[in-house]
Amino acid sequence: MNLAVLLGSIAAVLALAGIAWLLKLGNQPRIESPEAAARQAREAHSGFRPTEVALDGEGRAALVLGEQGEAVLLRPHGAQIAARVFRTPPRATRKGSTLTIATDERMFGDAALMLGEDEAARWAALLGRP
Amino acid sequence: MPDLPSPTEIAVPVFILLVLIEMLVARRVNPARYEPMDTLTSLLLGTGSTVAGALTGTAVFALALWVAQFQLVEIGYVWWAWPLCFLLDDLAYYVFHRSAHRVRWFWASHVIHHTSQHYNLSTALRQTWTGFISVSFIFRLPLFLFFPPTMVFFCAGLNLVYQFWIHTEMIGRFPRWFEAVMNTPSHHRVHHATNPRYLDKNYAGVFIIWDRMFGTFTAELDEDRPRYGIIKNLGSFNLIWAAFHEWVGISRDVFAVRGLRNKLNYMIRPPGWSHDGSRDTSDSIKARWREDEDRESKPNANPSETLPTE
């Protein structure tokens, strides 16, 4: 492989990605309902039995608690939803109506859930972070 | 020694054209099948893979020539050697691929190909940067005891080209006779899926017969549509992280755990293995899934206290 081939390859790659963008491919995924969040959590963690769902007001993220005290965090990644499983309830901080779930993974990042003031306070208490 | 062309280099313009066509079809059928950042990541990882291959290719070819000194039989370039070599190279690919999913050291290199949550032709080009480090070339070495290295590499190139077109959701299923023998989009969707039913299945390159022979075949079911990616999806489009995250994971585990046996196990046991059993392997995921299936299929099962899931 010489430099010209490499530069040509990179140009073709950028062109294809640009075309995908121009064609408006991909979409912003939305978690439509608590039931949808529960289903997606079960898909992400086999054997998971959801008991309670905190769903972001815009459907941009959700935290699902399970029967055994474990939790599944759902958040968008491109046009898909990416999940993280916690064996115990995750660390959370509340600021007004926003509950932020920490994943302790720099590359995955934290997830913010807009829940409304009361719900955010209730979930913060539930997760042990009033 | 004939001067054989590189099948992959010849095929690259066709790859680009087919990706473009698939994107245009996706726009009409289902725009979510592609995502610009995902496509960019896949294609740049593919470009990086060709650079890594160019840097290490000479060493691998030299090793092949060295092994070929000890050839057991001199078959040469007779006509029947070509299909035989192609078939046995595909078997070697099956063994490599199965190991790449069951041994963490090989998985660390191969995982890059599975990191997209999409399944389209650009996913096919999401290839490893660290194949040389994982010594994945060892699976082909026995072939050099029988066939000329150039023939083996040519067949390997054809194998790789074949595998490109099966990375698509645009094609449903082929006639039964074809699905019985060949690896197809349907069979390979299963391989890329994270649904418990599909984990660690359909390792084939070109011929699905190896999976049928060695008990790793599962058919795609309409009622269990594949969900793509890895068990712990990256949630990031960072190229470097996609290429090296499992190597980082191995390093962390090996340094953190006590005992030589544990350190070794973090390298050679299946992905997800942990010394304290605190993580999921594909086996533990499947076991829980089967328990769930059994529980839900029992007519007198206790009514669930859990949330409905649509």
Image (cartoon, rainbow, N blue to C red):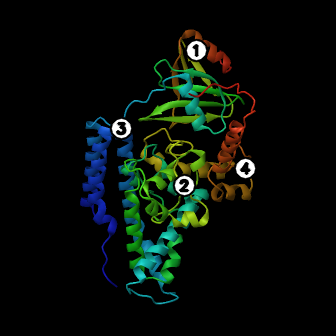
In primary-sequence order, the first of circles 2 and 3 is 3
Chain of the residue under the numbered disc 1 shown in the image: A
At label 3, the amino acid type is Asn
Say which residue label 1 marks.
A120
Classify the position of the N terminus of chain A by image quarter: bottom left
Report, in whole angstroms, how far the alpha carbon at label 2 lies from the one at label 3: 32 Å
Labels 1 & 2 near each other (Cβ < 8 A): no
Tell me which amino acid carries mark 1.
Answer: Ala
Measured in 3D between alpha carbons, the distance from the residue under mark 3 to the one under mark 1, in whole angstroms, is 36 Å
Residue drawn at x 53%, y 46% as measured from the top left: B230
Label 4 resides on the chain identified as: B
Task: Name the residue that disc number 3 marks.
Answer: B30
Comparing labels 2 and 3, the label whose residue is closer to the camera: 3
Q: Do the residues labelled 2 and 4 touch (CB within 8 Å)?
A: no
Q: Which of marks 4 and 1 is in front?
A: 1
Image coords of residue B169 (percent x, y)? 40, 47
**In terms of secondary structure, where does tag 1 sit?**
helix
Q: Is mark 3 on a helix, strand or loop?
A: loop
Query: Tag 2's secondary structure?
Result: helix
A85 up-or-down from A12: above or below: above
Residue on which the image places disc 2: B108
- Please state which amino acid type lies under the numbered disc 2: Ala
Give the class, few, some or many, for how many residues have Cα within 10 Å of label 4's Cα (few <14, many ≥20): some
Chain ID of residue with mark 3: B
Q: For mark 2, name the chain.
A: B
CA distance for labels 4 and 3: 43 Å
